[in-house]
Amino acid sequence: MDPTLIIFGIRALIRLAREGVAAFNQFERDRPALFPDGLSADFRQIDFIRTTFIPDHQDLLTGTGAFAKYWSGTAPAKVPGAMEALYIGAVQLFSEDQAKKKQVTPRKGVEIGGAVMIQQWASGKGPVGPVGRMVIAMADVGLEFVGANPSLLGVGGNGEKLIGALATNLADMIPDDGDALGPKSQLAERFVGIFLRAGLKTLDEQPNLVVREEHLQTLIKNTLPPIIAALPANLADQARWRDVADALLGPAASAAISTVAANPRAFLGARFDPNQAIGALTQAMLQQAAKTGLKQEFTEAGFIGLYQAALGVAAERPELFLGRPGTPAQQLASDLFAKLAATFKTAPPPFNADLGTELAVAVLDTVKQDGPRFIDKGGPWENLVVSLSMQVVDGLKSGLTDPATGGISSVLSEQQLIELARTFLTQAAKTPGMIAGGNTELQAVVGGVAKAMAADKNLLLAPDDWLGIAAVAAEEAAANPQRLFKINDSTPAGAIGSELIKDLLSVAGTELAKGGRASGGVLFGATLREAITVSLRSASGNAKAAVDNQAALKGLAETLSELVRTHPTQYGAKEWLTLYRTLITRVLQAGALGPLADAQIAKILEGGLAA
Amino acid sequence: MRRAGGGLLLAAVLAAGACAAGAKLDTLDSQLGTLSKENTEASRTKLAALASQAQAEAKSSDGVNRVALYRVAAVSAWQAGAAGQSQVLPITDEGIAACDALPAKDRTAPRDCALIRLAAPLAVQDDLTRQLATLQGHASGGKLPNADLQPVQGVFDGLETQFDKVSTIRAEVVTLDVPNDFKLRTDRQRLIVYCNAVKAWSLYGDVDGASLDTFNALAQRKKQMTDRLEVDGIATDCRAIPTTQGFDDK
């Protein structure tokens, strides 16, 4: 017998046997399979009432609404028959709503309860059936097989190195305890994968960041085990944790690797190992995100922003996380995130959203830059971060809520609001006395400037002008405590800084009403900004005189504005400012000036002393 | 002849080995059907064991058979309730990876892959619903203690997340060649998750010291879910979904 035929016959048998098995397996796979129903809790009468009325018909439950007398807050009022009246109303409303939404009809199948058996394929859509398959196999039995190329799975370059890191570190993360070999080991694998993918992406996007392989391994070793160890046992919590890690761990890894790469000295051979702080911070951030959810206090970007800022602190000042006796870094990091979340949850809008996070980032950046000036590293510095944030929020709040003007949010964008906060924070950090020991001077300064800004109804100053004025106000207030912006602002004496700014804005507003630029007025923009700066600097060292002569100071600005406007060919903005700088000192010393003679003006402008 | 005899032997060995997958699937699927009807503590423990067994069989199998076995494992772990909690996520992760590895991904085994993907969010919804039922039981004189504020909101948040996940899977399911019944069942599951979320939101209003602002904010999130269902032509009448009997033991 021809040996080729024998081999062919054997192949044919093997092939047919295989096809027979495959056909049987296909038959088993495609049989109807169980699709169970999810669990359903009790749907109470009150649930139907609430979901029918709220939010679409909430007006009927409040004010003069037809059902208002039966409703109080979030529940039926304690009125006899309230529940019955509300239910009848809800049934009627529901019917009307359904009639309006004609396209929404209960669908057969959606309504049928209990588990059902369902086929693999829609009718006529599946592959060739088991019998047809055997027929085709018999026809095909003479064909040769083609092998696959196993080298397709080869990995090279950075990917190979990172997969090497995965293998090394994964072994450390899989728990020895057999009982724990369930979800935790699964998550270890998943998290390392996420971390490494993010790392590879970061390196790919920024090849200039050279992170040594073993360094990356150390980062992974220190970052992931505490996260995996903290994994909860409950399925719902586990799923929430995993969602959070899936959403945040990649960006967090990128941030961590970038931070390490940007601070190689900090992460190599330091007295404290900031890599430990990174692990603590990552766990704390994910824990907080899992607790509050990704849609609540912070967005994903907010969480990562806060995390990145905290990493910056860990890189520059690792002792803040690692140097407090009796408080592990993880606890400290958790406290920091939890306190910030709680603070901004109850903060007034717009600080109860991402703006609050950005403010906290600004505070953490200040801690990173100037922490040692005003922080006791052994004390609860995380409380100071919260208190600094709130001093700025409370200060700005007074300028944000003016219903007449729309407040400073009509002057500054959210990003500029953060810049404003940074201006104050930088100054406060340079002057620890402003914030030490529960001092609320920072809040008073921020509040004073914010109130004055809210008075700029005509938008006479640009955002950059206001940022410049804020810097001067903060600097002068820091150098001259308790003068320009005292905590009690119920009288002018309590907040003369704000009053002086408001007076100049008022004079500028009057100028605008008289025609502004077109009529030769100059008190706006850079001139107005400089005038405010001069008045703040002059008053800061002599607050009592500024309070006593507030009206005279305003009168000086009015006089000069009138003078310049009525003599446009002789005087301009430069002359206005020169006269103001010179004469403000005299007003502070001697009170209101009389009319200004031409000779007197000329002398001042020539640089000589005024008579 | 000796050669030919060896070949036949090889063919028989191959056939027996490969045949095992179909036979195993038949056995495991039958057990799943039987145990899921029983609804007792003992049957749920057995379902958890069945999930482990199917997972182990899946690991030693390949291709579409592996996916089918993971489908049995995933549904078993889901139906095991609390007893299968720790198994659901690992099994569905492995099952999804097996689907992704198929030549045409989910299109190769549409029902099995869709069920594997649905099992995790539906198991989590069941877990949250058990928590919800427990919280409903805390009511005294129509009010829940203030300590329940966060847990109730947490259940709402969780159900909203599962609704989103099931809705995302549903968007893929409708593009697959699964029977129309499967699509309707998926919509029913969305409605169940939605209704449980409505119940959690409403229960928030019963908690002592509930914030009206939060209540109204949650109502807006509930409305977004309502709109998503209605866009897909599903009436959001939760009275059409009966309470599961005796599920708080499950």
Image (cartoon, rainbow, N blue to C red):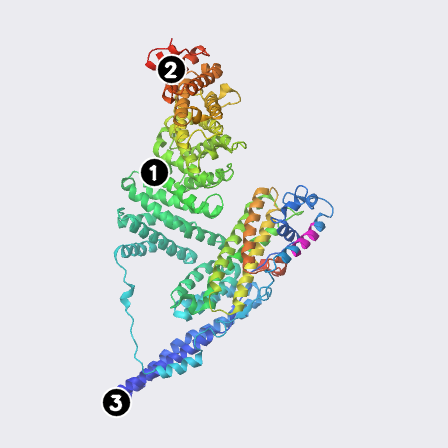
Position of the N terminus of chain A, as image quadrant, is: bottom left
* Residue B28 against residue A447 in the figure, above or below: below
Whether marks 3 and 1 lie on the same chain: yes
The reply to whether residue B177 is in sight is yes
Q: Chain of mark 3?
A: A
Kind of residue sitting beneath label 1: Pro
Kindly report the secondary structure that dominates the magenta region of the rendered protein: helix
Q: Viewed as shown, does residue A449 lie left or right of B135?
A: left
Give the mark toward the camera: 3 or 1.
Answer: 3
* Residue A375 against residue B230 in the figure, above or below: above
Kind of residue sitting beneath label 2: Thr
Q: Viewed as shown, does residue B147 lie left or right of A287?
A: right
Marks 3 and 1 sit apart, C-alpha to C-alpha, by: 81 Å
Kind of residue sitting beneath label 3: Asp
SS type, badge 1: helix
* Of pointers 3 and 1, the one earlier in the residue sequence: 3
**Is residue A199 inside the magenta stretch?**
no
Q: Which residues are magenta?
A: A86-95
Residue A389 pos. (x, y %) = 45, 34
Q: Which residue is mark 3?
A: A2
Q: Which residue is mark 1?
A: A318
